[in-house]
Image (cartoon, grey):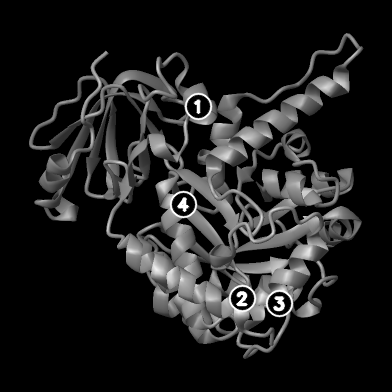
Amino acid sequence: MHVNDTTSAAVLEQLRRRPAAERRVLFRGATLVTMDPDLGVIDHGDLLVEGDTITAVGTDLSAGDAVVVDVTGSILSPGFVDTHRHAWEAQLRRIMPDVDDLGGYVMSTLAGYATVYRPEDMYTGTKLAALTAIDSGITTMLDFSHNSRSRAHSDAAVEALRDTGIRGVHASMGPHFGDWDGQWPGDLARLRNQYFSSDDQLLTLRLAALATDEVAGPALAYGPRLARVADDLGLGVSVDAVFGATSSEAIARWAEDGLLGPDVTLIHATGLTPKAWKAMGETGTTVALAPTSDAQIGLETAVPAVDEALAAGIRPGLSIDVEVALAGDMFTQMRALHTIQRMRAVNATYGTDEAPRRITTRDVLDFATLQGARTNGLVGVTGSLTPGKKADLLVIGAEDINNMPLNDPIGTVVLGSDARNITAVLVDGEPRKWDGRVLGVDLAALRDEVHASRAHVLYTPAA
């Protein structure tokens, strides 16, 4: 087995000699895990990137004047898609690793730390989350930015996504507690015009809301008023804290009012009634699961609702949620969901003749890529190695010590790999991680910035 110096500095320099729009790069000799239902897995495959777009996949492709990157001994995968993360909290990573209920998180973080965030703290947290996402192979991240205390806070969060080069979805919502300017949702029109004027750009905008008024009152709860705002601006909607009886009742009302559909994402979806799931399935509403959040924090039933989603005809996306208590990478989410669902499937049929209905590693990788893109409203842009889609992709070392020898490529991505195996990450055709290192980051300066922001947040009395 030939293992190459896939992503050396010399190859990167070759790439950078050409203007991005004129760049042609041929990745040669990898196992392509395309996640395209028609293309499947291609052994010893090639993938051609022209500018920001994948233009061909196959075997023995003609290189022409392309820069050839030898990726023998590697897997090429679509970048992972995170459908829901509160990125501004990244300075507070694992500050409460054993939180055991939603109320504990809400009161410490949303009613406490969040109230003292300045715009610069929003920028630092969001930037740190996005850079870490890239490092672990997440090329698209939906930032559920629910601490938009002023226009400047929102601007800082958007600019952090822009400055990292991630494919970012800014889902904007007002804060739960504390003083704020009351500019949301009215400020969404300005945000759209200032930062999201093009349909062909890395950043997109969504409206974020809560399912009910139980935690933060009616102003943040999804319903006809916020649905009209989203419709008038042409925005998708992401709804958080969707769980239990009250959310189930709200979903039934939304269905009756015509407020559900493919441009609406319901997050968590634990403990919902069959009636609610039926409404979601019939309207094509998308679902973002948060496997470790549901299980570890104990949200409603504490069981990620993958079986319920699949039974309703919904293939969900996956998400990270809150790094104050959880891991920030997609490998953890895939493995947690794979393990929990298969455990429950076997347990449910134990002692009977019924065969367990188990999901597979391909299912969870599909959720983490193609279905995540669908959930974020970007299925035509990213989520699979399909010609015509943007070049959001990972190079994963299949012959590294923890992965060799390569037997099943999808199993290797889901169960064997982690951030150390990701040699390169491209977002929109641009190298963002290369030779195992996130590019363009002064780590010492970032560390100083993060520590200074954390000190402000932790030691300033709650507003």
C-alpha separation, residue under disc 2 versus residue under disc 1 = 37 Å
Q: Nearer the viewer, mark 4 or mark 2?
A: 2
Q: Earlier in the sequence, mark 3 or mark 1?
A: 3
Q: Secondary structure at mark 2?
A: helix
Where does label 3 land, which residue? 112
Where does label 1 land, which residue? 416
Q: Nearer the viewer, mark 4 or mark 3?
A: 3
Q: What's under tag 3, amino acid-wise? A: Gly
Q: Is residue 103 visible?
A: yes
Where does label 2 land, which residue? 458
Q: Earlier in the sequence, mark 4 or mark 3?
A: 3
Q: What's under tag 4, amino acid-wise? A: Ala
Outermost top residue: 353
Q: Nearer the viewer, mark 2 or mark 1?
A: 2
Q: Earlier in the sequence, mark 4 or mark 2?
A: 4
Q: What's under tag 2, amino acid-wise? A: Leu
Position of the C terminus by quadrant? bottom right
Relative depth, front residue between 229 and 123: 123
Q: Residue at x 38, y 66 (%)?
A: 446
Q: Is residue 9 left or right of residue 122?
A: left
C-alpha separation, residue under disc 3 versus residue under disc 2 = 9 Å
Q: Residues within 10 Å of mark 4 (few under 14, many from 20)?
A: many
Q: Is residue 385 visible?
A: no
